[in-house]
Amino acid sequence: WSSVAACQGIVKNAMVSRLMRGQKTELGTEGGDEYRVRLSLRKDVAEVFLDTSGDGLHKRGYRKTAGLAPLKETLAAAMADFGRIRRDSIMQDPFCGSGTLVIESAMKALNIAPGLNRRFAAEQYAFLPAGSF
């Protein structure tokens, strides 16, 4: 049980089998709504979680198509806090690459909550009423 892929396959097969029994069907199909599931194995205990967040929480929602930034948004926000960025601050980043530090500093100066525009996977769940979020 040390292979991640083997564990994923076993969990997926078990979940599909159980769902097929619950739906009283003998044919499992791929496709339809997507629900990410996380598995945690510790000693002899397995826990299965429904991932309601989706993408990592460090992704704030303002970088749609860019690749990996060398600086995570959460670290940039912490640097802006440490630098005491306020509305009247002057902030410079002469080595600006992806702009993460500048963006997070501007959001801090404008008092915009981190992740305000971020979307969560659970917002798309078919079993939750529209407008829950």
Image: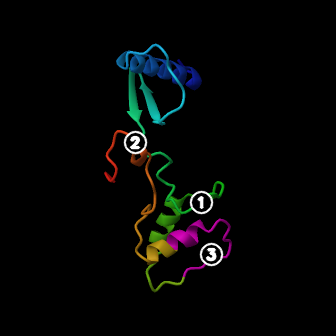
Frontmost of labels 2 and 1 is 2
Quarter of the image for the C terminus: give it.
Answer: bottom left
Name the residue type under label 3. Answer: Asp
Q: Secondary structure at mark 1?
A: loop
The mark nearer the N terminus, 2 or 3, is: 3
Position of 82 relative to 31 (above/below): below
Residue visible at 55% across and 70% down in the picture: 103
- Res 84 seen here: no
Q: Which residues are magenta?
A: 91-105
Q: Secondary structure at mark 3?
A: loop
Name the residue type under label 1. Answer: Leu
CB contact under 8 Å: marks 2 and 1: no
The mark nearer the N terminus, 2 or 1, is: 1
Residue 32: x and y in percent read 50, 33
Residue 25: x and y in percent read 42, 16
Residue 103 is one of the magenta-drawn residues: yes
CB contact under 8 Å: marks 2 and 3: no
Residue 96 is one of the magenta-drawn residues: yes
- The tag on residue 112 is none
Q: Nearer the viewer, residue 41 or 57?
A: 57
- The tag on residue 71 is 1
Residue 126: x and y in percent read 39, 40
Which residue is labeled 2 in the image?
Answer: 125
C-alpha gap between disc 2 and disc 1:
31 Å
Position of 91 relative to 63 (above/below): below
